Image (cartoon, rainbow, N blue to C red):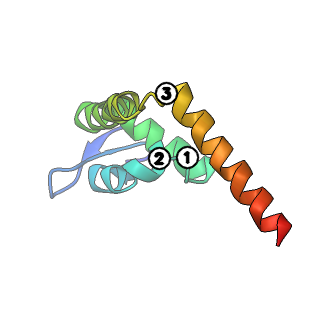
Amino acid sequence: MGEGGGARRDGSAVYGKNVDCDEAVHQLYHFLDGELTEERRLQIAEHLNYCAPCGGAVEFEAELRMVIANHCRDHVPESLIRRIANAIDEESRQHDGH
């Protein structure tokens, strides 16, 4: 089953260096977070390139992360930033004075 694709008895597909769907999905978040070794990343990437269901899962998760990141960015008013900076400066001055 080396470089090509095949199926296991449990129905999961194997692509590349014996990476099946269960392994690819289990490693999905580590893959997206860049937490895999280069060799393992390439093995998972090869599976994701050839396996439509797993490739779709990684695309969905990556897009979901972008949507969440874009919607979670709050705009902080400049006046609030200045007030916080001033409060920190004042606290520092009082702490240094004692």
Where's residue 12, x and y in %?
A: 21, 50
Q: Which residue is mark 3?
A: 77
Nearest to N terminus: mark 3 or mark 2? 2
State the separation of the CA atoms marked 2 and 1. 5 Å
Q: Amino acid at mark 2?
A: Phe
Secondary structure beneath dot 2 equals helix
Q: Nearer the viewer, mark 3 or mark 1?
A: 3
Identify which residue is drawn at 66% across, 42% down: 85
Identify which residue is drawn at 60% across, 49% down: 39
Residue 31, numbered label: 2
Q: Nearer the viewer, residue 44 or 1?
A: 44
Residue 34, numbered label: 1
Secondary structure beneath dot 1 equals loop
Q: Is residue 38 visible?
A: yes
Q: Amino acid at mark 3?
A: Pro
Secondary structure beneath dot 3 equals loop
